Amino acid sequence: MITFQEIVSTDSPEELIDNEIHTYDSINTQDINNEEEIQSTIVESVDSTPREELSPIIDEKALPPITQSVEQPTPTPKKEEKSLKKTFSDAVKEAKKEHKIILLEIYGTDCHFCKKMENEVFTKESVVKEIKDNFILLKVNGDEEKIPLGITKQMTPMHVFITETEDIKYMTFGFLEEKDFLELLEKEKN
């Protein structure tokens, strides 16, 4: 805490220059004495508190030694998303091997109902299980990627059911609730 004390000289400016000894009157000395009393009380209370109870600003034990250097993690090189993504020919090979129908989902970059379907339907355990057990899922961004089999994007989301021989079995457009989508999957899996 900082205490300010206003000091007023009783000497005139001319006397200040000519004299070496000056007389000063202190204003608010009572306030200053009270302030000093408060400060001494604070110091006494801190001094009487055991060291363990004081909360340190910095825990020196938690800091690494100055000589020790902190290792930065080595950045993992990014793989291209295309190389990790399943292609249509991969889906066809997998469908032939497992004798399943390909479920081609065509979505749009800014499609509200595509995002709604992704968040509200494709996250449901019953839908995930049905697709995993009976279909080969392939998702294609109709705005940025080539759609296989010459299919043109008409509306998103689009769900196209394709046989292992690359024939289009059934096609549907727009958002479907979980119950309706499960009924469609049940109908198209055979």
Image (cartoon, helix red, strand yellow):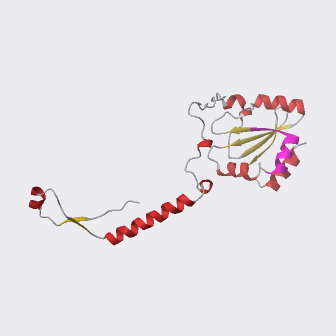
Q: Is residue 27 above or below residue 19?
A: below
Q: Is residue 60 above or below residue 80?
A: below
Question: Residue 73 placed where, x, y %?
Answer: 63, 31
Q: Answer with left or right where residue 23 lies relative to residue 146.
A: left
Measuring 85% from the left and 47% from the top, which residue is drawn there?
Answer: 185
Residue 7 falls in which quadrant of the image? bottom left
On the rendered image, what quadrant is the N terminus found in?
bottom left
Residue 34 visible in rendering = yes
Q: Nearer the viewer, residue 157 or 90?
A: 90
Q: Answer with left or right where residue 2 lies relative to residue 48.
A: left
Measuring 31% from the left and 69% from the top, which residue is drawn there?
Answer: 29
Residue 55 falls in which quadrant of the image? bottom right
Q: Nearer the viewer, residue 179 or 40?
A: 40
Q: Which residues are magenta?
A: 124-138
Measuring 68% from the left and 44% from the top, which residue is drawn there?
Answer: 154
Question: Residue 58 placed where, x, y %?
Answer: 56, 47
Q: Nearer the viewer, residue 169 or 5?
A: 5
Measuring 65% from the left and 29% from the top, which residue is drawn there?
Answer: 76
Main secondary structure along the magenta-highlighted residues:
helix
Residue 148 within the magenta-colored segment of the rendering: no
